Amino acid sequence: MHLENHSHPTAILANASLALRVGAAFVYALLLVALYDSLSYRWYYFGFLWANPSAADIVIAIVAAAVPAAFLSPRPTGFVQFGGWVLHYAVVSPAIVVPILQGLQHASSNYLLSVTISLCAAAFNASLRVPTGPLPSITAMQFEPRTIRSAVRLLTIGGIAYMLAAHGTSLRLASFEDVYDQRFDFADQSSIIDAYLVPIMSNVFIAFLLATGIRDRRWIDILLAIAGTLIVYSAFALKSQLISPILIFGIMSCFDKFGNFRPLVIPLFLISISSIYLIFFSGNIDATGISGVLSSLIFMRTILLPGVIVGEFASFFSQFERTYYSHSLVGRFIVDYPYGDLSVGQVVGLYMFPDQGAAPFELNGNFIATDGIAALGLPGIPISFAVAAFSMHLLNMAGIKADRQATFAMSIPYLMTLSNTSAFSSFVTGGGVILVILLYLYGNQRRREDHSANLAERYMSPSDQQAIQMDVRP
């Protein structure tokens, strides 16, 4: 029997896509090493320690960071797969690379930490590719699109009015140098309402108005979203609140004319800005100039800090008592929290900066650091990824019927919160639950039997459309 030896075009494309995904992740990990080397001398007091890693250390870090990218979806068709791409570059890569460069633990412990995160991230990315259907359609919860938009506008306006009435005299557009002073001042005056209102406004309502407003060119929603962004930044002074509108617009521009998301734009953009910075600004940082702002806002606090935090948490909780999830809303009723009135972030912050007095600095830990390392050490890392995967699959099921372009974009603030806090906190106090409800209403909206009613379907893959058709009830 004669067998023809022809390479199938689909196999060739699949291999090329795999090579591009892994190659881009490898190059970015290499640039992370260079960025960390460049910035460590400036930010050493903030945990950016340079342990003179060997060539073997660097190779292990880069390879371990590139492996999970092989399991990312080459063509994200849902929020859950898109989120995998964002979290890989926002959390996973620095969490794998930086602890080895810090050298806060013995080399073998650092290797074990990075390899554990790498393997868990690979399984996490693979799990995000498992198809899930939409949540059941409930006719009683189908509303006109204009009704949903009007409700979100009213809630946003109500939130702005509350912030002005309750904190009008203390709101101010703090400079990047004064954000911590503004944050502490607001925290002293804030209530439980503010703790929930600020992230819900920023991560849900404002994101929804901005994403759908840009897509449909509704300037009233765009302007309202910008006003809301300025108000919440004037309150809590989180730099991510100023960055997220830019990222929302950037994500929306990553779709081609057929409504397909081009995920490689994410690493290519990061590789480009990192390369430009290293070429033109590395070693010549003016703290008060543009190079200082870029190094602090983008490279130090956004790109590298998640890895620094993982390294610091791993060092602290290898020596001191773990929380066994007593830091979470549920766990505190089962296990006694060992650190009194201090949060996990404050405990580690006090460990890093012991001379802080009565108001210790809070080092916010991402889901790997908080839900994994702080809770159980290394065994907690797979659990932290499992919790994050569950929350993302739930969001995906809620928004699978919604317009893909707007859904991907409006999820960016939530993903940024997940990159900076516990998965439990992100889902409960960070607006995750409200985002699930809004995405469900947005995708479950009442549709007219005409062309305009099917606009969202232009952005759905055949598998998504089939899932929706299977969900139709007589």
Image (cartoon, helix red, strand yellow):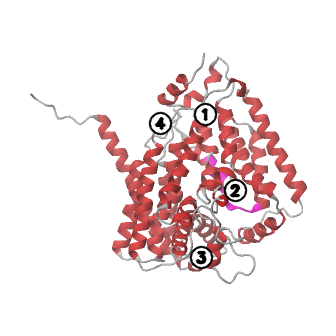
Disc 2 marks which amino acid? Gln
**Inter-mark Cα distance, 1 to 4:** 18 Å
- Helix, strand, or loop for circle 2? helix
Q: Which residue is mark 3?
A: 46
Q: Amino acid at mark 4?
A: Pro
- According to the picture, the residue beneath numbered tag 1 turns out to be 403
Q: N-terminal of the two: label 1 or label 2? A: 2
Residue at disc 3, secondary structure: helix
Reply yes or no: does residue 79 show up in magenta. Answer: no
Q: Who's the residue at 44% across and 43% down the image?
A: 73
Q: Which residue is mark 2?
A: 241
Q: Nearer the viewer, mark 1 or mark 4?
A: 4
Residue 453 appears in which quarter of the rendering? top right
* In the image, farthest residue toward the front: 334
Q: Earlier in the sequence, mark 1 or mark 4?
A: 4
Q: Nearer the viewer, mark 2 or mark 4?
A: 4
Contact check, label 1 and label 4, Cβ < 8 Å: no
Task: Identify the residue position indicated by label 4 in the image.
Answer: 131
Q: Residue at x 64, y 68 (%)?
A: 345
Which element carries disc 1, helix, strand or loop?
Answer: loop
Q: Nearer the viewer, residue 346 or 159?
A: 346
Using the image as rendered, state which of residue 135 and residue 78 is in the foreground. Answer: 135
Badge 3 density bin: few <14, some 14–19, many ≥20, Cα 10 Å: some
Q: Taking 235 as reference, is 286 above or below it? A: below
